[in-house]
Amino acid sequence: MMKTKRLAAIFAAMMMALALVSCSNNDDEKTDSNQKSTEPSTNALSSLKAVDGIDGVYTLEYTGEYFLDGAINASLKTADELVAYLTKNIPEWKTAKEPVKALKINVGGAACSSIVVKNKDDNGYIYGRNFDWESGNSLIIHTKPDSGYEAVSTCYIAFFTKDPEWAPTGNPEHDATAIGGIYVPMDGMNEKGLYIANLNDNLPAVIPSSPDTSKKDVQTTVAIRYILDKCATVDEAVAFLKTINMYPVYADKKGSKDAYHFAIADNTGKSVVAEWVNEELKVTKTNIVTNHNLYKESQTPTTGEDRDHGTFRRYDSLKEKYDTAKGKMSAQEVTKALEEVQQKHSVWSAVFEPSAKKVTYYFRSSSATEETSDPIDYAKPVVVEF
């Protein structure tokens, strides 16, 4: 069960089940076959809550069928195809007109930072991540599939509603839109300690020109959801990525120039960036990821004014702290490192502690503006345990 410890706020969880295919062959470790169910969650919308004391941040609990297997097998190439698939299958949307109109998969980018270190306090690992985008509301989603892994992920609400200020109202037809966030995670961690985060890359976004017909077509954020649900290690996540044709959500819009790459890490300390170069998956070992392509790092500026700009400045700042600490930091030190590379348009910082199955979030204050205040309020942590 997920618990958010902000003024003792505790959010309800549901106890239903889901049968999905695993990246791993060890299904017995993840599920009791006597508990499987194909029924959807009936209480998800009643779990949709505002986080106490933090404006514009909401939580959703979902235990049950959300038809991920079918989304993978359907080879969905575009956001419109994904919306049509979900509208047809998610029970809460079948009779509701408003969610059908409101749900608009519209991922616009993510100029972010990620760091992976050894936890000097418990010999585990810590993953830190800033999500940088325009001011808007956020959704923390706790999913508990029967044959997949329990996970916590974070969504930027405007990416699936086109409305940065969308908020639940208590009207089921309106609130059902939030379930779409399950398919649009920006980052997350599962019960096995597998972490993944989506970040902008500086290469052009490219739709596969000659997709392999033996592979399934999968979109960016659907791939993230599958990895959280099904993969326990970096190796499993990379193996999955090799089996699909990746269709970038960013390239769904004509003329989009925004590409992406994935920071992926696990509780063994393995940490990589997965990138697509000339339509080919490239995997590079790294503990730091910002917004330039690391596979082509040799082609980026090493000194001078260009190196001090944006992505390189943030990368170098995190790398310096990593090297100074010899790769070992506390959760508080990771938080401080993230704070020092936050941008005026940062929306949240997240510190993932896999050994404790805990995520500590710091969100942008709703009153923050670029002129008057820091974008993230580090005085108000939201702690999630699962």
Image (cartoon, helix red, strand yellow):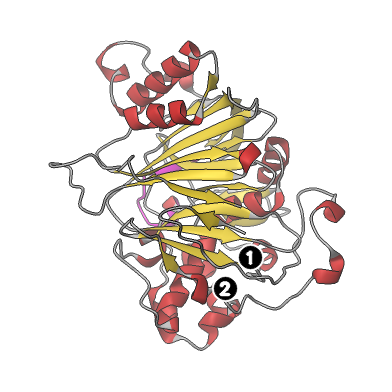
Numbered mark located on residue 71 in the image: 1
CA separation, marks 1 and 2? Answer: 7 Å
Residue at 55% over, 19% down: 328
Q: Which amino acid lies under the numbered mark 2 shown in the image of this protein?
A: Tyr
Q: Tell me if residue 149 can be seen.
A: yes
Taking the image as shown, residue 32 lies to the left or right of residue 284, namely right
- Identify the magenta region: 251-262
Tell me where residue 102 sits by quadrant.
Answer: bottom left
x and y, in percent, of residue 35 in the image: 81, 70
Residue at 76% over, 74% down: 37
Categorize mark 2 by other alpha carbons within 10 Å: few (<14), some (14-19), many (20+): some
x and y, in percent, of residue 355 in the image: 65, 37
Confirm or deny contact between disc 1 and disc 2 (CB under 8 A).
yes
**Residue position marked by numbered label 2 in the rendering:** 85
Categorize mark 1 by other alpha carbons within 10 Å: few (<14), some (14-19), many (20+): many
Residue at 34% over, 32% down: 339
Residue 345 belongs to magenta span: no
Q: In which quadrant of the rendered image does the N terminus lie?
A: bottom right
x and y, in percent, of residue 349 in the image: 40, 41
